[in-house]
Image (cartoon, rainbow, N blue to C red):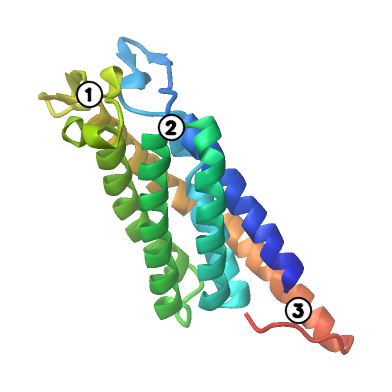
Amino acid sequence: MRTGFYVALAAMVIVVVASNYLVQHPVEIMLGSFNLANLLTWGAFTYPLAFLVTDLTNRRFGPVVARRVVLVGFAIAVILSLKFATPRIAIASGSAFLVAQLLDVSLFNRLRSGVWWKAPLVSSISASVLDTALFFTLAFAAQLAVLGANDGFAIEHAPLIALGVDAPRWMSWALGDLAVKVLAVILLLLPYRFLMSATAARLDSGADSGLGGAAA
């Protein structure tokens, strides 16, 4: 179990640190006359992997170990993020990460006895909504400048996706981020299923060999 814990912990730290860095970089790609920088940051594509790590850890080792990965990963990631992101981004990311991941662990554990896809799907989407709302508000809302200097590009008004109104650009980032997270959660059900089955096969093999293992 110790090796699995350290693998999960390392994966969590890498995902969070990378996401904290990438969320500061809008996607500068033009689709016709529309600039994706008004809608997405690169962090939207990496952060959903954190939920995959949490859910696989929860399925393999249970909620106690999953929470331990979240808490230790949170502490290490925040410290490392200070080297790759602004203090405000690190604070926002750490706060949103901790609350959302603990919600994910709790919901997953309540739903774990149902069909295989229900627990990771419901828990990850619910946690994604909470994470997105907390992170983007703390990181970019002009009213919270006490946490750190405002990002001029983020608070600049721009069309709010296709709603025909102008709003701070970070609100469009939040909506785009959430859309990507939900899509990623759905797509990540495939590797989740594969890795879950592979883990179960290893456990069965260990049991047949008399080695034993932790129950999933």
Q: Residues within 10 Å of mark 3 (few under 14, many from 20)?
A: some
Q: Quadrant of the N terminus?
A: bottom right
Q: Earlier in the sequence, mark 3 or mark 2?
A: 2
Please name the residue that numbered disc 2 is placed on.
23
Q: Residue at x 30, y 52 (%)?
A: 129
Is 57 located above or below residue 31 in the figure?
below
Is 200 located above or below residue 75 in the figure?
below
Secondary structure, mark 2, is loop
Secondary structure, mark 1, is helix
Q: Residue furthest left?
A: 165
* Residue 138 in sight from this viewpoint: yes
Left or right: residue 27 versus residue 207 is: left
Which numbered tag is attached to residue 203? Answer: 3
Q: Which amino acid, by three-letter code, is at mark 2?
A: Val
Q: Which amino acid, by three-letter code, is at mark 3?
A: Leu
Which numbered tag is attached to residue 155? Answer: 1
Q: Quadrant of the C terminus?
A: bottom right
Q: Residue at x 46, y 35 (%)?
A: 43
Q: Nearer the viewer, residue 176 or 102?
A: 102
Asked which quadrant contains residue 91, the reply is top left
Residue 127 position in % (x across, y down): 36, 58
Task: Using the numbered discs, state the Cα–Cα distance from disc 1 to disc 2 in whole angstroms.
Answer: 15 Å
Residue 111 position in % (x across, y down): 41, 77
Q: Nearer the viewer, mark 3 or mark 2?
A: 2
Q: Residue at x 30, y 23 (%)?
A: 151
Secondary structure, mark 3, is helix
Task: Using the numbered discs, state the Cα–Cα distance from disc 3 to disc 1 in whole angstroms.
Answer: 51 Å
Q: Nearer the viewer, residue 35 or 41?
A: 41
Q: Nearer the viewer, residue 158 or 80?
A: 80
Residue 208 position in % (x across, y down): 85, 87
Q: Residues within 10 Å of mark 2 (few under 14, many from 20)?
A: many
